[in-house]
Image (spheres, rainbow, N blue to C red):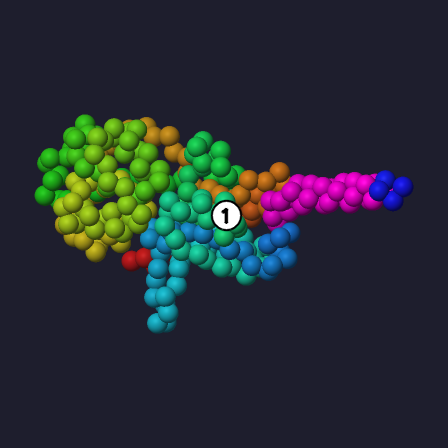
Amino acid sequence: MKKLKKSIITMVVGVLTLGMVGCSSSNKGDNQLEAIKEKGVLTIGTSADYPPYEFHKEINGKDNIVGFEMMIAKEIADELGVKLEIKDMKFDGLLGALKAGNVDMVVAGMSPTEERKKAVNFTDVYYNGEHTILIKEKNKSKYKNINDLKSAKIGVQKASLQETMAKDVIQATDIKSLNKISDVILELQNNNVDAVVVSKEAVDGYLKQYPEIVNSNIDLGEQKEEGSAIAINKSDDMSLIDSVNKTLNQLKSKNKIDEFVKEATELAQ
């Protein structure tokens, strides 16, 4: 009889334990919005080497990460009633940091490609930029169109939309991918690559820094432009996505994002 009672108790405890584990597992990744509000901090991941999107700027003797996307992130944090924390890292490590739970969002000029959508959720697109190709001024007569670039060595930021464009639009056979766009530009300056694919909004500062580098004005043809969106971890609970989209739509309706772009571009000069 004692053995029977003991078996029944063991079974009940086992069922309760399984039930607790099941509840814990089912809640994993849910209620992202409430989790951020509870901790009082919104932690975003970015790659701060892409003016005017995000970049380092010394202000009053202190290094700051600024840019129009950081302004957007601040608006989102304010709407949530929390502080903003920015983590700067390599672009190709951002989604890994998001999946690992080290950041709550990725705000880094990231395009919501179909491949990325398999791993994470994305907000609405909030900005559509254009792309251009930078070359050395001495090579303007050498590189006049996309066909001229197919055999050239093309520099791009690793895991970026520009890397995809170098492969699919230019159909380059020699591509050099680096973690930071500043390193890619430096490779062009040092004649280690022949051309660089970059966002048009990001070029002004680099063109002033390196007078030998110019915009090629090569026609890239009709491009599939995914634009920029914020990446958020996969979850069945869409409250965080909905909240961020609401803020983005408010900013767009008031033309605030265009204002942020202008302000950040001037700051990057």
For badge 1, the amino acid type reads: Ala
Q: Is residue 211 left or right of residue 87?
A: left
| Residue drawn at 46 percent across, 57 percent down | 86
Q: Residue furthest right?
A: 1
In front: 220, or 154? Answer: 154
In the rendered image, residue 25, in percent from the top left (x then y), is placed at 65, 42
Image quarter where the N terminus lies is top right
Give the residue at mark 1. Answer: 100
Q: Nearer the viewer, residue 35 or 207?
A: 35
Please give the name of the residue rendered at 10% of the width and 36% of the height, measured from the top-left corner: 141
Secondary structure state at the residue bearing disc 1: loop
Which corner quadrant of the image does residue 156 belong to? top left
Q: Where's residue 213, x and y in %? A: 17, 48
User: In the drawing, does residue 173 fall left or right of residue 262?
Assistant: left
Q: Residue furthest bottom?
A: 61
* Magenta-drawn segment: 5-33
